[in-house]
Amino acid sequence: METTTSRRKILILGRPKSGKLSLVKALTFSLPDGLNNESTPHAGLTHSITLTNRYFSTEAGIWIDEIPDDTETWLGEYLSEEATPVLQSVAAIILTVNNSTATSASDLRILKQLSDRGEEVEWDGTCLVVRKLSESKHASELSSLCDDEALELIDLNESGENEFGGTLASEYL
Amino acid sequence: MSLEVPLPLNISDLEKLGLPRVLEVLHTCDWASADIDDDGSIGSLQDAEIDFELNAFDDDKENGSERDVEYMERMMAMLISARGNHARNIVANTRNGSGYEPRGA
């Protein structure tokens, strides 16, 4: 099957150290170019992933952006009229969160606002929240917040199937 | 005495977790429709059997597609990098035809 190149992208958003690159590496088994050292900001890094199933094989670009301290200005740019084409060119927005930080709730609100903006402009993309599996006290709180905002939360390191009869891979270990 | 009847288990009905779930969601995204100028009829996974390839990357649209991509990437560069110098690098790279490259690449 021929692999085509999609014009749509995956946008991965998150605070510093929230697991953006961990997610990229898990998805693609590689890291973006341009990571010169640990202090290299991740905003603006790009990568790509090939998605293949029985119906299609397509290479999609990955955009990475970092949520700054000044979230209002940053978010305002994303929500602006001028940015509508960018939103339309994104097929999925993935927010990475770190349970150990207290910014997760505000980060979820950012994703929700992007999702709401998407509805206004008839965007057909998907929003996801991804975190590294954690025993943090904030873990269940984050789950509740995602439920409240109707956002799907995925624990990146969890594996296997769900409670309907599947067995987690970790139980085999 | 109770009689337990195990539910028939169809492996395809199980919900995936973790990374497989992320990939599953990504596969269900609409990778064919590209921008606001499209007619919206091109396939998602639901109708991928119909004409994903036929519509998404029509040769007749090639030039337009490239312009679209270039425009999107410039927009994204402005969004992502208005806060720093590397916006200029990305825009310059795009204009030079060398694509969207992160700073330092």
Image: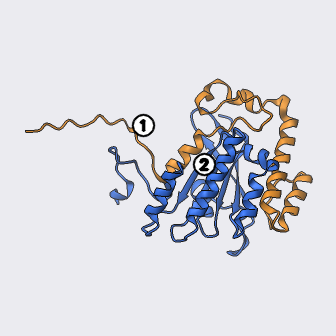
Q: Which residue is mark 2?
A: A127
Which residue is located at x 70 percent, y 74 percent?
A37
Q: Quadrant of residue A130?
A: bottom right
- Residue ID at (32%, 44%): A165
**Chain that is orange in the image:** B
Relative horizontal placement of residue A92, taking residue A129 as reference (left or right): right
- Residue A106: image x %, image y %? 60, 63
* Chain identity for the colour blue used in the image: A
Q: With A40 as the anchor, is A96 left or right in this view?
A: left
Which residue lies at the image location 52% right of the left edge and 60% below the top edge?
Answer: A131
How far is the residue under mark 2 from the one under mark 1?
Answer: 23 Å
- Residue B4 against residue A129 in the figure, above or below: above
- Residue A35 is situated, as x and y percent measured from the top left of the image, at 72, 68
Please, which chain is the residue tagged with disc 2 on? A
The kind of residue tagged 2 is Cys
Front in this rendered view, residue A3 or A70? A70
Label 1: chain letter: B
Q: Which mark is residue B57?
A: none
Which residue is label 1 attached to? B12
Quarter of the image for residue B14 reads: top left
Q: Amino acid at mark 1?
A: Ser
